[in-house]
Structure formats: structure tokens, C-alpha cells
Image (cartoon, helix red, strand yellow):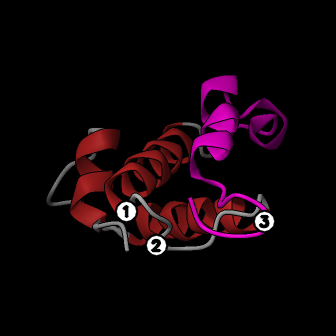
Amino acid sequence: MVDLEAVRRFAGADPEADSTALEMCLQAAVGWYQSAGVPPGSEPEELYDFWVANLAAWMYDNRGNADMAAGIPLYIVSSVHQLRPPKGGSA
């Protein structure tokens, strides 16, 4: 599972600040990848952690933006192809 402190560093969030919003963004990022067919803890784990932390930080930076759901950056969307397990078996 992605470390909340890694997400905090990606987002540039104050280490002393309340982490509730950051935790919500992390859970939303995990859910987004899961909905895209990438289960939590996918292999390679370091790459999965990187992309989930990246998306969580993006969500944190864009919280309150009404257009956020429609505007996830294409580089994050394309990461699904790196992470999604191949159909019919393992890599």
C-alpha cells in the first residue's frame, strides 16, 4: 500500500497539517486505479505506488476544482496500461 508520507511529499503538503484530505485523496486514487482494472498492490509494486501517489497528489492539489473528475491528466490515465495485469495470466 502506498505510504501516506510519500503522498505528502508528492503533494508538497505541510508535514504538520491535518492529513484527512490527503488520506481521502489517497483512497480516491486507489479506487480510481481499481476501477480501471488495476488492483491494489499490483506488480511491480514500486511502480504502482508511484502512480497512485502521483494521482493522489494531483487530486490533493486540485481539491475544490469542480472540473477535476473530467480532467485527470493523460499521463496518469496512460499509466493504467503499465499497471493493468495482462488478460489471461501474469506478465
In the displayed orientation, state which residue is furthest to the top.
74
Who's the residue at 60% across and 67% down the image?
90
Question: Residue at label 1?
Answer: 45
Q: Quadrant of residue 44?
A: bottom left
Could you tell which of marks 3 and 1 lies nearer the N-terminus? 3
Q: Is residue 83 magenta?
A: yes
Viewer-nearest of discs 3 and 1: 1
In-front residue for pair 36/12: 36
Circle 3 residues within 10 Å: few <14, some 14–19, many ≥20:
few
Marks 1 and 2 close (CB-CB < 8 Å): yes
Horizontal side of residue 1 vs 65, given as left or right: left
Specify the segment rendered in magenta: 65-91
Question: Residue at label 2?
Answer: 41
The location of residue 31, given as percent across then percent down, is 67, 69
In-front residue for pair 74/72: 74
Circle 1 residues within 10 Å: few <14, some 14–19, many ≥20:
few
Q: Which of the numbered marks, if any, corresponds to residue 85?
A: none
Tell me the CA gap for discs 2 and 3: 14 Å
Horizontal side of residue 6 vs 78, given as left or right: left
Amino acid type at circle 1 is Glu
The location of residue 57, given as percent across then percent down, is 44, 44
Residue 64 seen from this side: no
Q: Secondary structure at mark 1?
A: helix
Question: Residue at label 3?
Answer: 35
